[in-house]
Amino acid sequence: MRVLILGGDGYLGWPTAMTFSKKDHEVMVVDNYLRRDLARKHDVEPLWSVPNLLERVRTWHEITGHTIRARIGDCCEYSFLAPIFKEFQPEAVIHYAEQPSAPYSMLNHEAARITLNNNLQSTMNIAWAIHEHVPTCHIVKLGTMGVYGTPNIDIEEGWIDIEHKGRKDRFLFPRQASSFYHTTKIQDTDMLWFYVRTWGIRVTDLQQGPVYGIETDDTILDDRLKTIFSYDEIFGTVLNRFVVQAVSGYPLTVYGKGGQTRGYINIKDTIRCVELAMLNSPKAGRLNIFNQVTETFSVNELADKVARVGRDRGHHVEVKNIKNPRIEKEEHYYNPTYSGLKELGLEPHLLTDDVLNSMFEGVEKYKQNIQQHKIFRGVKW
Ligand code: USQ
């Protein structure tokens, strides 16, 4: 397939591009380095630096003989994005081109504005470019489990049947996010659902939980092909952060009571899920939604696992409950459905001790790069 990957420089975008390219899809990546720029501006660069996207694409070609085309530019600029759709005629577009951090979106007015403008404008531009230039193209958009919040009922896979005063209909499952970033993802879904109903485009929305992991089959081919790995409070997700904290002797930062439960996923499974979604395009005029997680854990459970494996490896690991900088429930019911992607063929990589040990190995090699001041600064909600 001809696949356009927007946000192709990111934690998920770059490994997705390599996997698809290796499988002989015709891949083009697009990125404007927003995440790199924000990380530099806020002094929260990843654990190791990675070459720029054009260099990575050259290295990929040198090592595998496969070609990934790359364009540097902003998906919020329609005059940049639309011609790419017109010329490349993608059959699928993978939309990762969003500001991905909840804490960043709560930092200040400027950060909220960037999050809102970037996430909604890019999504709207993609819908228009498809409508105008390649109406059969399937949008696979990365959403988030955070759109649902933590309701006191089971979370369905995107949709819910409601009976009201004797009549029945099907609606998007109620959404109530707990950060401004997550709220833009709700707005994305609403916008795309409108265009699906109105223009008959095809969309799959992947509601993903926090991702962990360092490696995929392709990132290990050469150090220059590594994906970024963030451990700071703004761009790092909780499990990746805990492993770095354990290696550097920083007490694991459990927010509040630590009963916050989420669905988690290994980076290898993210890429497989995106591939399965892409290969199973909905019919015109349909919005597919999948919950992209493989198992659920509380923060306390994650901290216990990391502490146990870390101590077995000789690290001195402490766990500390600190005042929660976020407004979120710390004890709650959580029971999401996540069967759709498994029915399409996902075979999950679960969070075993082996997986944790390989994450520790990956981080220990870069221990000298860990800067403890990046770990916690208390971005408050
Ligand atoms: N947490 C801690 N200590 C930490 C960091 C986080 O206790 O040092 C807690 C948070 O309070 C939260 C949970 O761990 O309850 C998950 O936090 P996170 O920072 O790993 O994830 P979050 O901010 O929700 O966002 C991440 C990604 C985002 C994605 C989302 C999926 O950055 O792009 O959409 O995970 S989800 O959480 O399911 O909405």
Image: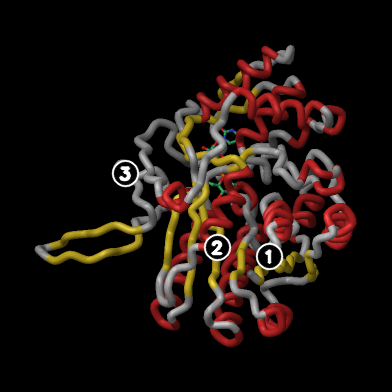
Q: Give how far apart the Cα atoms at labels 1 and 2 are.
A: 11 Å
Q: Are marks 1 and 2 in contact (CB under 8 Å)?
A: no
**Position of residue 250 in the picture relative to residue 283 (left or right):** right
Question: Residue beneath label 2, please?
Answer: 278
Q: Quadrant of ligand 1?
A: top right
Tell me the residue at 48%/73% (across/down): 202
Question: Residue beneath label 3, please?
Answer: 154
Q: Quadrant of residue 243?
A: top right
Expressed as whole percent of the image width and height from the top left, the position of residue 100 reads 62, 54
Expressed as whole percent of the image width and height from the top left, the position of residue 374 reads 76, 37
Question: What amino acid type should be assigned to the residue bearing mark 1?
Answer: His
The quadrant in which the N terminus is found is bottom right
**Visible in this render: residue 36?**
yes
Question: Residue beneath label 1, please?
Answer: 25
Q: What element does badge 1 sit on?
A: loop
Q: Earlier in the sequence, mark 3 or mark 1?
A: 1
Q: How many marks?
A: 3
**Visible in this render: residue 177?**
no
